[in-house]
Image (tube, rainbow, N blue to C red):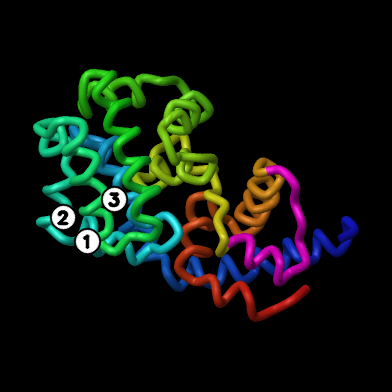
Amino acid sequence: MDNDNHEAVARTLAAIAKKVANRERQSLEEAKKRNSDLKRPDFVWHYLLQSFATMGRASGWKGLLGNPDNYKAVGYKTLAQLAPSARAVHVEVLCRRAGIRMPALKAKYILGCFQRVEEMGGPEAARARLLDLPGREAKMQFLDDFPGIGPKYSRNIMMDVYHEDFRESIAIDSRIMGIEKFHGLEFTRYEDHESFWLGVAHRAGLNGWELDRVMFGFQKEFLTARA
């Protein structure tokens, strides 16, 4: 795609984003209030679990976190009371019962994250270490070091709570790449995806977080008009 077409696509996408964001302004402002979750002592553990529950299929949230019994059963304190071998069986059984995608793999991720949090001294210590890190890149690196957490979720965990260091971020996923494909966009590096979409956000008078949430919730509206 040449620069002129690239520019035309950016203008088209910005117009769609602005229209949807204006219409959904109240829900966007409500979502920003999740910033209060940063105060949770188990912030890191909770959002790691949320990442694995929704990874590949957002409906997994209902089975793991939305089910009080399942959520309690995968709580850090519950897992800490189990011997390692029993913990491994318990977590995989729970992942299957919760109906999350790729339960065996997600169980391995959860167990690996448990070990890492345990080595840090528990959930509160992990939270303190994360929030003490300066800037976006250091926090992303911290989260990326957890098993199963890559470039998308090292952003998305902090974006979910509208952290100030992540308000100019885009969590690139299959939905966003579907929009890119529809509009003939191709990028090779994660940073190139993110840079393009941040440009679209600013054209629309939005920050990156707002555009990311609008695209996640209203993908179909970005698949209706071409430049």
Front disc: 3 or 2: 2
**Depth order, front residue of 99/141:** 99
Marks 1/2 in contact by CB < 8 Å: the verdict is yes
Position of the N terminus by quadrant: bottom right
Q: Earlier in the sequence, mark 1 or mark 2?
A: 2
Front disc: 1 or 2: 1
Name the residue rendered at 51%, 56% in the picture. 212
Q: Earlier in the sequence, mark 3 or mark 2?
A: 3
Q: How far separated are the C-alphas under marks 1 and 2?
A: 8 Å
Q: Is residue 186 magenta?
A: yes
Q: Where residue 137 appears, x then y in whole percent?
A: 53, 28
Task: Indicate the secondary structure of the residue bearing disc 3.
Answer: helix
**Image vertical order of residue 45 relative to residue 177, above or below:** above
Label for residue 33?
Answer: 3
Task: Indicate the secondary structure of the residue bearing disc 2.
Answer: helix
Q: Amino acid at mark 3?
A: Lys
Q: Amino acid at mark 1?
A: Arg
Q: Which residues are magenta?
A: 176-189
**Depth order, front residue of 129/73:** 73
Q: Which residue is mark 1?
A: 97
Pointer 3 local density, CA inside 10 Å: few below 14, some 14–19, many at least 20 = few
Label for residue 70?
Answer: 2
Horizontal side, residue 165 vs residue 176: left or right: left
Name the residue rendered at 63%, 49% in the picture. 198
Q: Earlier in the sequence, mark 1 or mark 3?
A: 3
Name the residue rendered at 55%, 56% in the picture. 173
Task: Indicate the secondary structure of the residue bearing disc 1.
Answer: helix
Horizontal side, residue 208 vs residue 132: left or right: right
